[in-house]
Each structure stands twice: as C-alpha cells, then as structure tokens.
Amino acid sequence: MSDFDGLDLQSVEDQIDEGAEDGGGSGRVVLGVLDGSTPPEEWVETVEGGAVLVLNVDGDINELAAGFARDVKEAGGELMHFRGFLIVTPPDVDIDANRLD
C-alpha cells in the first residue's frame, strides 16, 4: 500500500448526496468493528440496504470477511482494505482509489 495523507471525505459526501437525490443508496455510512461478533448476514443486509460500511478490522481480515465478501461482490458491491479498515460499498457506490497512487 502506498502512503496516503487523508481520506477524501468531500468526495464520499458528494456521492452520498447524489445518491440520496436520485433515489439511489440510503445516504448512510455505517461505522463498525469487524471482529466476528456481528453475523455476516447483518453486514450483507446493511449493504443491500444501500449503506456504506467502514469497519475497523480487529483480527484476520480474510477470516472475518469470508462470511459476507463473496455475497457483496456477487451483488455488485466493492470491498477495499485500507489502513486497518474494510470499506464495503453497495453496487451504486464506487470506491475511488486514484489518490492512493
């Protein structure tokens, strides 16, 4: 991973606003901890409802995300591990990592 000085929150907010205006997405960003205590189905339902997940990873990301990552990807969503966090988006929200280069 390359160095990154900050998350472009303005871009995230703009996309959320656009999604809310055109009826897409829930306009929600859900913060949580990925530690195995939340059932994978709950994460899938949250993303299917249009929310973006920002999960602090507490443990092995591959084991912890195994229960829902495939479902999210098959539904058209995206997942990205970034600085100890797992960002999970629904199909109508893209993760733009261009500024990480």
Image (spheres, rainbow, N blue to C red):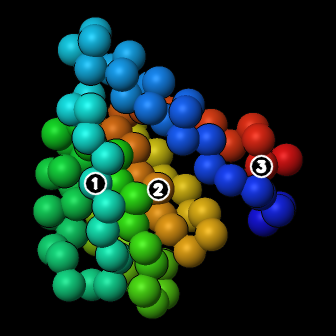
Disc 3 marks a residue whose amino acid type is Leu
Q: Is residue 93 left or right of residue 28?
A: right
Q: Residues within 10 Å of mark 2 (few under 14, many from 20)?
A: some
Quarter holding the N terminus?
bottom right
Q: Is residue 98 left or right of residue 27?
A: right
Residue visible at 41% across and 52% down in the picture = 88
* Label number found at residue 100: 3
Residue found farthest to the bottom: 59
Query: In terms of depth relative to the viewer, which is nearer, 10 or 59?
Result: 10
Q: Which residue is mark 1?
A: 30
* Disc 1 versus disc 2: nearer the observer: 1
Disc 2 marks a residue whose amino acid type is Ile
Using the numbered discs, state the Cα–Cα distance from disc 2 to disc 3 in whole angstroms: 14 Å
Q: Residues within 10 Å of mark 1 (few under 14, many from 20)?
A: some
Residue visible at 55% across and 56% down in the picture = 80
Using the numbered discs, state the Cα–Cα distance from disc 1 to disc 2 in whole angstroms: 10 Å
Q: Residues within 10 Å of mark 3 (few under 14, many from 20)?
A: few
**Image coords of residue 39 (percent x, y):** 15, 74
Tell me whether circle 2 and circle 3 mark residues in contact (CB < 8 Å). Answer: no
Mark 1 or 2 closer to N-term? 1
Q: Which residue is mark 2?
A: 87
Image height check: is 101 above or below 35? above
Query: In terms of depth relative to the viewer, which is nearer, 73 or 96?
Result: 96
Image height check: is 38 above or below 101? below
Disc 1 marks a residue whose amino acid type is Val
